[in-house]
Amino acid sequence: MSLIHPDRLHSYVRRVCAGMGSSEREATLVADQLVGANLSGHDSHGVGMVPAYVDGFVRKRLQVNQHVTPVVDSGALAVFDGNSGFGQVMGYETTEAAIERARTHGAAVVGLRNSFHIGRIGHWGEQCARAGLASIHFVNVAGHTPLVAPYAGADARFGTNPFCVALPGQGDRPAVLLDMATSKIAMGKARVALNKGVPVPDDTLLDGEGRVTTDPAGMFVHPRRGALIAMGEHKGSGLAIVCELLGAALLGGLVMSEDSMRRHTIINNMLMIAIDPEAITGRDALVAEAEAYLDYVRASAVREGFTEVLMPGEPEHRSRIERADGVEVDDTTLGELRAAAKVVGVPDAAEELD
Ligand SMILES: NC(=O)c1ccc[n+]([C@@H]2O[C@H](COP(=O)([O-])OP(=O)(O)OC[C@H]3O[C@@H](n4cnc5c(N)ncnc54)[C@H](O)[C@@H]3O)[C@@H](O)[C@H]2O)c1
């Protein structure tokens, strides 16, 4: 393990993106989100994604310096195409459009289709919350083999289809940020466990024979790859299916199928609903009501085996405080990051990791 200052990780990501030909703005948006994910405690969506992005670039699945283009635009309803561009740019531009439209109309339903990986969805919820808006995000993942088995299924049929809800709070910090994969653990968490040589939690993974295992290697064996288990039994499995249908089918985006999984890419589609509280009771009233309610929930007696009752978003907030001066990166990931810098002709970028 090495402890690396977030500024140096940020610089590493910017330099690798520049190696791929990204503009400074694009490189900064990518670095902001990836390092932000590490700071939030989600290493699965942090700088460890860089090798996958470099691979997407080399295979011409990821196009640099793209912008969203409108496909549908009727004011409060808009759909954008992400042109297989960096999801950090596509997510940012789509969310800016949703914020602007929600301020004009009180609410906006905005879709993004055909974007390369849009990373940690909470990042887009936080962008809305900073602007004073509440937001709901349904996301699917397509373009590669499915990773998650449906309830009662022994093999994978969908991606880790994330769902997110954010509500504005005091200042820049959301009052609530529920941001989750609909699998029990995110795929990146199995990768992180494999790289660290540690087991995954009980009852989160099936091996290639459909048996429950804690060995993350089960997820990476070809051709009989295992599957992540959907969260929340039949209810979580249902939410994952709804993310696929609202986040992609409704928008004309790529839905998981025998055909779409052969593209060897990481496509995300996202349906977001942004709501301006100023059009209803006002932001201050919402924040006051939300904080009073959250305090009431927090005051629940703590169950045996637990130490406290946390609200969605609190673990990420604490992680940001703890990691402000350094993020631990394991040796396998460091090796992959060094190799990725070489592939795009900027081996010196790896000096940021020393
Ligand atoms: N782009 C994609 O394709 C994609 C796919 C899947 C997941 N993701 C991202 O992966 C990240 C990780 O997802 P995850 O499901 O592993 O997250 P997680 O399980 O760590 O957290 C899920 C939610 O539960 C909350 N939470 C965590 N511990 C808690 C506790 N003890 N008490 C109360 N609340 C708690 C968190 O604040 C968060 O809102 C997310 O940011 C998600 O957006 C992205």
Image (tube, helix red, strand yellow):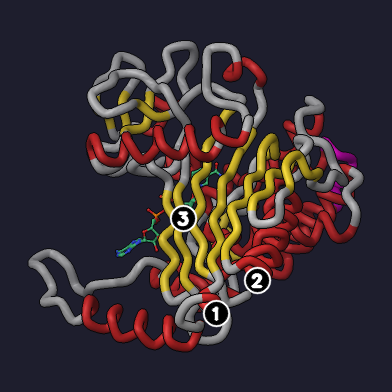
Residue 152 image position (x, y, % from top left): 23, 24
Q: Earlier in the sequence, mark 1 or mark 2?
A: 2
Q: Is residue 179 a member of the stretch shown in magenta?
A: no
**Crowdedness near tag 1: few (<14), some (14–19) or many (≥20) residues, C-alpha within 10 Å:** some
Which stretch did the figure color magenta? 343-348
- Residue 255 visible in the current orientation: yes
Q: Earlier in the sequence, mark 3 or mark 2?
A: 2
- Residue 354 visible in the current orientation: no
- The residue that disc 2 covers is 103
Q: Secondary structure at mark 3?
A: strand
| Residue drawn at (48%, 33%) of the image | 245
Residue 285 image position (x, y, % from top left): 43, 87
The foreground one among 219 and 116 is: 116
**Crowdedness near tag 2: few (<14), some (14–19) or many (≥20) residues, C-alpha within 10 Å:** many
Which label belongs to residue 33?
none
- The residue that disc 1 covers is 278
Instruction: Please say if 104 is above or below 351.
Output: below
Asked if the residue at label 3 sits under 8 Å from ligand 1, the reply is: yes
| Residue drawn at (53%, 72%) of the image | 323
| Residue drawn at (63%, 66%) of the image | 105
Amino acid on which the number 3 mark rests in the picture? Cys
Answer with the quarter of the image where residue 273 lies. Answer: bottom right
* Label 3, label 2: how far apart the Cα atoms are: 20 Å
Q: Secondary structure at mark 1?
A: helix
Q: Secondary structure at mark 2?
A: helix
Amino acid on which the number 1 mark rests in the picture? Glu
Q: Is residue 345 a member of the stretch shown in magenta?
A: yes
* Label 3, label 1: how far apart the Cα atoms are: 21 Å
**Cβ–Cβ under 8 Å for marks 1 and 2:** yes
